[in-house]
Image (cartoon, rainbow, N blue to C red):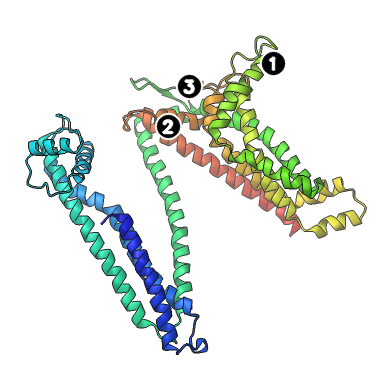
Amino acid sequence: MPLGWLFLLVLLIAALGYALGRRRALAGAGGNLRAMHSLPGAYGWNVAMAVLIPSLIMLALWTALAPFVLDRMVAPLMAGQEGEISLLMSDVRRVADGLVRLGEDVSSVQAEGLRDRLAEVGVAVGQDVSDATLAAAARYDVLSARSGWALTVLVLAIALGAAAWSLRRITPGLRARNEVETAIQGLLIAAALVAIATTVGIVLALISNTIRFFQVYPASDFFFGATWSPSFGGGSELGILPLVWGTLYISAIALLVAVPLGLLSAVYLSEYASKRVRAWAKPMLEVLAGIPSIVYGLFALLTVGPALLVVFGDGGLGWMQGGTAVITAGLVMGIMLIPFVSSLSDDIINAVPQAMRDGSLGLGATPSETIRQVVLPAALPGIAGAVLLAASRAIGETMIVVLGAGAAARLSLNPFEAMTTITAKIVSQLTGDQDFTSPEALVAFSLGMTLFVVTLCLNILALWIVRRYREQYE
């Protein structure tokens, strides 16, 4: 049975369990709600969650683990074949997907017969696919079908068994509400653990591949090298300093644009603007956050770059040789970050107690003095968080850098020259058919690890600033 239909069937059993559980609880109490520990809906949810939780867990685990088990069962049939086992098994799965279209048992069909049968249903199998691959694909198809039926039987047995067991437990005195709340709390904890496990998995993947990189390339050359010149033919120079400099330089220009404009717009919207102006100005400002970064990149390439070239190029001051430069990417990225700073700062400023404003005005301070000396210091921790979010967004941006700043890795203070960032080089090093055992490909994980550490340091710095200044208002 297809997974979608099986999932819907489990939902149907859970819905029926909810209705039956609710009815059984009411019948047991003779329709008297006061004789029941919980509301009728809690008894229904008790049955529904007893059906859903174990059934969906089994469905998820089986779906995740079945491909690995099938690969291990079929891999011995590919012994003696030339090539990596992962590539061979990829061919096996591809051919097995074609066998599914036949809709019949092909375990006893010979290799040549399989080629003809696959051709009849429009699946082309090249001559480079060996007979052993075809035989393994036939076996994989049979095992996959059996796995699907076993999953269907097991999940339905769990769902029906859980429904019957939970229905038998229902009595008017059952603490159904407590059990449902405990189950919901467990689901929330599981969701948090999934998020934590995902973060840990990402970090471990970065660390393991970074270690592999430093086993084939000197760490001193990577961290202190001033030249970035990868070459898949050998002789690469993979110094990270030009990429770090380009990342920080472009991000600094973006923040110089976004923070003042975003903060001033937040102050205006929260303290000076009328309700009518705020009603249309704030949504219009936040529209900038919904524009895809590729659109900003095209804006930098086609509009901002040529406009800057007119002023600072050969026809103007002569400082700029091309439209792709640090200043181009920094300006456009700063425009993109304005709503991040403005929207969050606006919410934080509005959260400052009105009593603080009234007290300042009552002592004779002007509105501008109140904002500068009372409101902004009180909102400083939240504003620091908004700036941190903008900085993290700037450091991780890719498309604006690729289209607006160029691809040159260099150490220069000239903002009118082309440079590049860590994120742009991560993309370029992992694009195409690369050998993931070479330092030129593994360096992408080291760059990612460096980016992670830089972001972590920014978080620690922001936390220190927040704690230091928050003490004045506690």
Amino acid at circle 3: Thr
Give how far across and how far down residue 33 sits, in percent.
51, 86
What is the residue that sits farthest to the top in this orientation? 315
Amino acid at circle 2: Ala
Amino acid at circle 1: Val
Label 1 Cα neighbours within 10 Å, binned few <14 / some 14-19 / many ≥20: some
Give how far across and how far down residue 82 sits, in percent.
15, 32
Label 3 Cα neighbours within 10 Å, binned few <14 / some 14-19 / many ≥20: some
Instruction: Report the residue marked by disc 1.
Output: 311
Q: Residue at x 59, y 21 (%)?
A: 412
- Determine whether 20 is above or below 310 in the image: below
Give how far across and how far down residue 210 sits, in percent.
40, 37
Residue 328, picture quadrant: top right
**Helix, strand or loop at mark 3:** loop
Left/right placement of residue 6 relative to residue 105 reads: right
Instruction: Report the residue marked by disc 2.
Output: 219
Q: Earlier in the sequence, mark 1 or mark 2?
A: 2
Q: Residue at x 48, y 86 (%)?
A: 36
Task: Residue 176: tell me if it is visible.
Answer: yes
Q: Comparing marks 2 and 3, which lies closer to the viewer?
A: 3
What's the CA distance linking mark 3 and mark 1?
31 Å
Give how far across and how far down residue 380 sits, in percent.
72, 49
Q: Residue at x 64, y 42 (%)?
A: 340
**Helix, strand or loop at mark 2:** helix
Left/right placement of residue 151 relative to residue 196 reads: left
What's the CA distance linking mark 1 and mark 2?
43 Å
Q: Comparing marks 1 and 2, which lies closer to the viewer?
A: 1
